[in-house]
Amino acid sequence: MSDSLSPSASASVHVGTARSVITPPLGVLGTWRLRSSTATGVNDELMADALVIERSGTQLALVSLDLVAVDAAFSAAVRGRASQRTGIPADAIIVNASHNHSAPAWPLDPAPEGSPLRNWGESVIDRVVACIEAAHRTTRPARIGIGCVAVAGLAVNRVWPEHPVDDRVTVIRIDAEDGSPILTVLSLACHALTVGGHTTDWTADFPGSIRRHLEGALAGGRAMFLQGAAGDMAPFDYWFGNPDPQPMGFAAMEQFGAEVAGAAVAARARIRTSANVDLDWGAAPLTLQRRQIPWSAEAIRLAREAAPTPDVAALPPVWPCSLHTVNSAQTMPDFYVDAALTEFEGLLRHGGAPLETTLRAVRLGSLTILATPFELFSDLAFDVARSQDGRDQTLVLGYCDDYLGYFPPDGSLGQIAGYTLEDQLDQDKARWAYGITNTQVADGEGQVFVRAATSLINAVGNK
């Protein structure tokens, strides 16, 4: 466990926290496809959590949302408005989505103006900004410590189930001056999809379960979840094509949440805290070459004409027990073929234009948090961590400030290089490569990303 913090003779650290409920209204549909029923209840509320940290004039904010993802416009609005109200630099505000598949997708199009979902969406930005402002207004002296613990057996690489798994859980312990808990920040890398489309209730999935179990064990303290590089990470044995996976549902959600929270509570007890914590942040632009597919617009048009039209009217109200995320593409392939063709059409529209984005990083003592807008595969997060040669602890987050899709490691596209267009649309043949077949990033750009991330991490804290 890493628990050392860099001392400094300057003023002690101050923190503020706030939370807001962002649960959508009933009567609208969440992200899970392959069902027709809208939300009819709330199993557990969807939340926005904000953490503001200050020291010696340096301010930053971390925000966690129980949403699938956010786009650049959403994050820009949050960062801009919150910066105006608090004075926190906009680039020092990181918005992380938990990638909860039981929440609505963002952006909310095609939800029409005036619809319940559209009205909710407009209110979420205001609630998140108010949450950051409330955290900023309530900062107080604090002590912070960093830890890491492995939780084996709760996740699998869903693309290559034989690969090593990133089972690390990062724990940030934040206490008041008297030692009472203020906040426990927990981060791991795993798709938040334990529940599936088997319910009509809103739920935060396992991030919400982790928070509840942590808060139950730490009376008076709040918990916050940050989603890591989860592009190829799934709960339990949910690898693509598994013929006999553990069932999805609320029982699976609570099992996952209880086990992770239990390990975090034990780890938290061993973390030493300090009031003297080095604090810094930075941002850097990133340009990546976009993937260019080998098929013409005409070939894709013909493939779409030949593909069956998904029959939305035939969808069941909720998923039957036999339907699972590991077999959904093979069970109801028409919807996945339609989505794949839409991805390819989008790549053609972009015409090879590069992907332009921003990486952000914050340094908190011995921990550097790197925020990325991708569904980053775990190998790339491992590469970033290895670039630090064990000097400090690095936490790589996905789903931050925008959503730019899957980012597999270099060489992944070579594994499907011999696939024809028909092969990539064949869900029996290509489902295992989900996240590779639909990436926007060109092969070879993984090392470009790692170099840019390493440069930013090295710059933060060394100004």
Image (cartoon, rainbow, N blue to C red):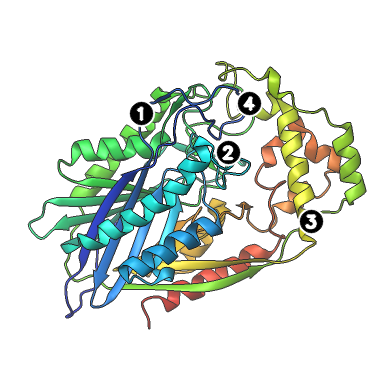
Closer to viewer: mark 3 or mark 2: 3
> Is there CB contact under 8 Å for labels 1 and 3?
no
Residue 20: name its quadrant: top left
* Residue 369 visible from this viewpoint: no
Which numbered circle lies on residue 254? Answer: 1
Choose between 393 and 127: the one closer to the eye.
Answer: 127
Q: CA distance from mark 4 to mark 3?
A: 27 Å
- Amino acid found under the numbered disc labelled 3: Arg
Q: Which residue is mark 4?
A: 34
Q: Residue at x 50, y 27 (%)?
A: 27
* Residue nearest the observer in this picture, 198 or 456: 198
Q: Which disc number belongs to residue 349?
A: 3
Callout 1 touching callout 2 (CB < 8 Å): no
Mark 4 residue type? Leu
Q: Residues within 10 Å of mark 3 (few under 14, many from 20)?
A: few
Of labels 1 and 3, the one closer to you: 3
Q: Nearer the viewer, residue 168 or 199?
A: 199
The residue indicated by pointer 2 is 158
Q: Is residue 383 above or below residue 426?
A: below
C-alpha gap between disc 1 and disc 2: 21 Å
Mark 2 to mark 4 CA distance (whole Å): 20 Å
Q: Position of residue 324 (x, y in %)?
A: 58, 25
Q: CA distance from mark 3 to mark 2?
A: 30 Å
